Amino acid sequence: MEESKLARTDLMRIPAGIPGLDEMIEGGFPFPSVILVSGSAGTGKTTFALRFLCEGAARGEQGLYFTTLSEPTQWMMRFSSQFEFMRPEFFDDQIVYEDLGNMLREGNSEKLLDAIESRIAEVVPQRIVIDPITVVGEMFKDDYRQFLFDLTNRLKNWNATTVVTGEVRPGELYPPEISYAVDGIVLLNMAEELGARRKYLEVLKMRGTNHQTGKHCIDISRKDGIVVLKARF
Amino acid sequence: MNEKDLLLFKQLNAQLGVPLIPGLMVLDVRTTQFVKVELVLLKALLEERRPGLFISVDRPHQYIVHLLTMHGIDCRNLTFLDAVAHFSADSHPASVKVGFFRGPRNIDTLPEALKNWSAADGGPGFDLGKCGFAVIDNLSTLLNFNSQQMVRSFLNEFISALGGKVTIPLLVDRGRNPDLFQMIKEIGAGEISLAPEGASTFSNRSRLIISNSNNAGGY
């Protein structure tokens, strides 16, 4: 290699922790980046987000979980403790749980942004989750696009990979307001086939990544949470 | 900061020396831990209350100001040189001494700009002669915009512009950038190795080579 040429180092990646997904995206999510996980109710968005944080915690990385639902920690943990990958001790120190509900009710998007940023600066996480981001859209209708632009712009500068979850309406693939601002979109989808509802995962966008396309069957298990199933013929 | 961070702070404090040992040094840090280690490093460097220089080539300087402020670290002795603010759509204000230059593609112009800027009337008035330390956030980013040869020549000129009396600790992920790490060592950098008990010893203080019996990789 000539010394005058750029070295073109590969993007730093961190494993998502979802069995089968990392192989689809060259080993993991780019670090830093903002990834949208979209899907309708019951498709596994929160399970995805928790698995992502627990994977980091198991690797010694700091996590920060923002909930917009005002759900107390113990309530979230009650359900998620059913998964084997969830270790309650992670929530003592390695995963910090932060409720944004009260701040949302104040209705000031600039204050919310500052609160998120201040908490990030305090915790210095490598992995962040905002679950779900779409609640913010319902509260800040007029400011929502500007808020999302500022939020994603700032998140990328904090040297962390952020997963934001987005609830979609029937027939919608992803919340359109945020899709342009994120670096990746992972779609969790449910479809009725032969009288049963099957779940799928699809990577719609992953910047800087030669990712696999198409729908991949998923299963939600007690052991691993979401698992991308290998194609069977 | 948690216990692990405070242990790192103690180790860095011991290795940086009191007063700060001048010269180039390199610390192997995983890319995901850069910001965290940088925070602890700045806390250690700012302990002595000597003026320091912070070069932003990866993210706008306001983020580091915010980070330091949130952790109660006084950054009044820090002067920032920001090479990425003009890329950023973020206009977050921060009340610190700051100069701007066009980079990071024009990194070769920085040492000269630094000399001129330091002397320029109406500038932030940073006195290079009093500079105790300089931090670059972060060197690996420069490889996205410049060849390794250019980064090498920048580092040489940068050290020379600072007059050889300044502590310059560089954070590099050896696993991801082995050539860069090696190049910095070839320039004459001592390596800071961190051990659980802080058992590092100075094998050659004049060249800032800091050796360790347990050289088990980066932070």
Image (cartoon, coloured by chain):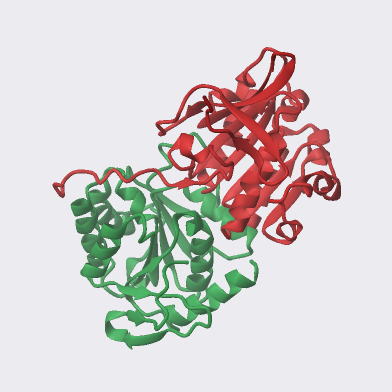
Residue A95 in percent (x, y) is at 69, 54
Q: Nearer the viewer, residue A29 or A117?
A: A29
Q: Nearer the viewer, residue A132 or B137?
A: A132
Q: Tell me which residue sits at (62%, 31%) in the image.
A: A218
Residue A6 in percent (x, y) is at 23, 44
Residue B133 drawn above or below residue A100: below
Q: Tell me which residue sits at (53%, 69%) in the image.
A: B43
Residue A42 drawn above or below residue B65: above
Q: Is residue A33 left or right of residue B200?
A: right
Q: Which chain is green?
A: B
Q: Nearer the viewer, residue A175 or B64?
A: A175
Q: Nearer the viewer, residue A127 or A84?
A: A84
Q: Is residue A123 left or right of residue B80?
A: right
Whether residue B88 is visible, yes or no, is no
Residue A8 in percent (x, y) is at 29, 43
Residue A156 in percent (x, y) is at 52, 41
Residue A200 drawn above or below residue B190: above
Residue B207 drawn above or below residue A229: below
Q: Which chain is red?
A: A
Instruction: Give the residue furthest to the front.
Output: A233
Q: Tell me which residue sits at (21%, 61%) in the image.
A: B157
Whether residue B16 is visible, yes or no, is yes
Q: Is residue A142 left or right of residue A153?
A: right
**Residue A61, quarter of the rendered image:** bottom right
How many numbered badges does the structure rendering display? 0
